[in-house]
Amino acid sequence: MADKLVVSTSPHFQKPGSTAGIMWTVNVALLPAGVAGVVIFGFSSFWLMATAIAFAVVCEALIQKGRGQKVTISDGSAFMTGLLLAFNLPPHCPLWVAAVGSIFAIAIAKQAFGGLGRNIFNPALAARAFLMAAWPQHLTVFTKPFVYDAVTSATPLHLLKEGKAADLADMGLEYWDLLVGNRGGSLGEVCVLVLVLGGLYLLWKGVISWHTPGSFVGTVALLTWVFGSRQGFFQGDWLFHILSGGLALGAIYMATDYVTSPITKKGQMVFGAGCGVLTVVIRLWGGYPEGVCYAILFMNGLVPLIDRFMKPRRYGV
Amino acid sequence: MKKLWRELWKGVFSENPIFFIVLGLCPALAVSTSLQNAVGMGLAATFVLVCSNILISSIRNFIPDKIRIPCYIVVIASFVVIVEMVMKAYAPALNRSLGVYVPLIVVNCIILGRAEAFASKNPVLLSLADGIGMGAGFTFALVVISFIREFLGSGKLAGYTVIPGFEPALVLALAPGALLILGLLMGGIQWVKSLRS
Amino acid sequence: MGKILAIVISNLLINNYILFRFMGLCPFFGVSKQTKPALSMGLAVIFVLMVSGVFTWAAYQYLLLPFGIEYMRTVVFILIIAASVQFIEMVILKMSPSLYKSLGIYLTLITTNCVVLGVTVLNTEDFFSAGKAISGSFFYAALQALSAGLGFTFVLLLMSGIRERLELADVPESMEGIPIAFIIASLMSLSFMGFIGIKI
């Protein structure tokens, strides 16, 4: 009974459905992207997802048991963390790396803060950033799409960052390729089409709102249009940028995580815009080719301050 | 005699400056990337701590209360200057890898803290023991942290590869890893403390 | 222009004094439980950094170098810093006694804040070469001091916001207090890694 008396900051929004209901709805929305990952990169993707999910779920069960709490793995949140972590890894990443990542995500980024609803940083992204810093050699090897024996190939953003290609034509790709996933990249980020469909499903079900993803993608589009071209301002290939890298995955599924994003709608717009600015800064001027992961993590840290300064109006006061 | 021994040992375990009093964190994280750095910094800081404890304890009855902190700082800073010069002359490689953290010994909270909390109120011999004990505890903590960081973060110990084929988690040699290791160590210690009580 | 931006970004983000250089950790963990004292502490540190940054640069340029006593740098600098802190304390006491009271001992402890001595020492390493000041040295030194202070304040603020929120969470007993603060700092440091290699 005690853990039904939750004291948290207001407002307490009432959404139809329980926590478990919402989590599993998101998992369902993510599954097509997982299937796409297997279709595009081969069966190793399946094992990567399975490993990440298994370690996340078992880790959470063990920790909750050890703390004497009720084991809540059936609420689907550990499952989702494992799945999202796998989506952010290269498809042929060694399984042990994913396992360590899942343990980090659950034990450190989630349970150490008190469990579901209490973490500040998105666990899957925190784990990915940790893995990138720990074993960069495994996190930066990407493979060709539709060639199931791992053949290394650079992602479009890598080619752009290293100056090996100036635009899509140089890379031998078209926008359609980016949309469908005919490019190198992380397991779950490449098939933008399926990710967007899942996002629309979540919007329809009322699980996410358009504010965060809208301002995130919009900001990236605007800034890359203004600054993205070497030939001058206002000539950037913004369509390329919103279809590449982890933007679709990040904006729709990771930046919208209730726990780590602002409570108010205005706050969410600010949050999304901030993510967008940082993503573009890192993509265009930073050392890494892709910035979505760090952008979201950085903004996660700002969320308590955003919430504090954007407290909703108290009517009748 | 027993009192001396007690003052000495408390610094290493029960009142370890880093793990229990939680002071001197800056160098603990910054120089714990390798065992050599840890030992080097530990010895340098211990030297300054012992000397300043002795001096401050000897003149404790002559320092006016109002300006005692600046006095302590001048004493400590002078010994740090000595350490800096000696290190530059006889251990230039160590000096280079410790970098700006050598002059920062002067603001190491442990040294000022012990001056204020102990040396200013106790006779010279006890202060000497306290200095040696705290310095040893500080060095011990640094060694523990850098053992973990060097081994897991670069696969080496004191520069020698230990397990061939082990893929180290590079992040542990970097800032986020240092903070993580220290957080987990502190958490572990708090857990052990709570088991005891 | 490039150098100015490089100094600002480096001190503010990439080599942030708290999250990457591990300086200023004591106040970072001590004053970061609430946003108001955190902001006040940050501003006080910026003041001290500016004042002592200027005077330590002058001392190095006009006193230590000409007389060949650079090795006295540590002693001279720490005395200047202690004096700056005394000065700031008097100013704050006059301007806002309640602020003075809320900062308490931590105001005096700015003297031992590694950031202040660290920045002043790094100024002499970065902006002097072979015993001579490089061109624009004074300006760069002041800029470095300001950016370091801003970076320190920013991270302090971030931390206080997070810790305020964690008051309502159910952190495991063994992690309460210092341990979870370190974990938070570790994750913040990870997120700051995104800024590595920025060249505008």
Image (spheres, rainbow, N blue to C red):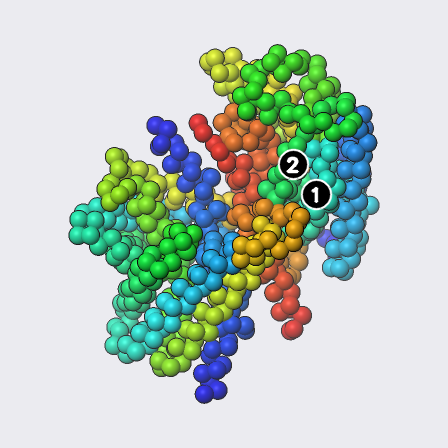
Residue at x 62%, y 47% (from the top left corner): B169
Is residue A83 left or right of B61 when viewed as pictured?
Answer: right
**In which image quadrant can residue C16 be found?**
top left
**At which x and y percent is residue B3?**
46, 85
Local secondary structure at mark 1: helix
Q: Nearer the viewer, residue C95 or C183?
A: C183
Image height of B115 relative to A42, above or below: below
Q: Is residue A11 visible?
A: no
In which chain is the residue bearing label 2? A
Badge 1 amino acid: Val
Image height of A64 relative to B131, above or below: above
Q: Which mark is residue C23?
A: none
Is residue B166 left or right of C2 when viewed as pictured?
Answer: right
Quadrant of the drawing holding the N terminus of chain B:
bottom left
**At which x and y percent is residue A239?**
61, 16
Residue at x 31%, y 74% (from the top left corner): B55
Local secondary structure at mark 2: helix
| Furthest residue toward bottom | B1
Residue receiving disc 2: A139
> Given contact means CB atoms under 8 Å apart, are the residues at marks 2 and 1 in contact?
yes
In which chain is the residue bearing label 1? A
Residue receiving disc 1: A97
Badge 2 amino acid: Leu
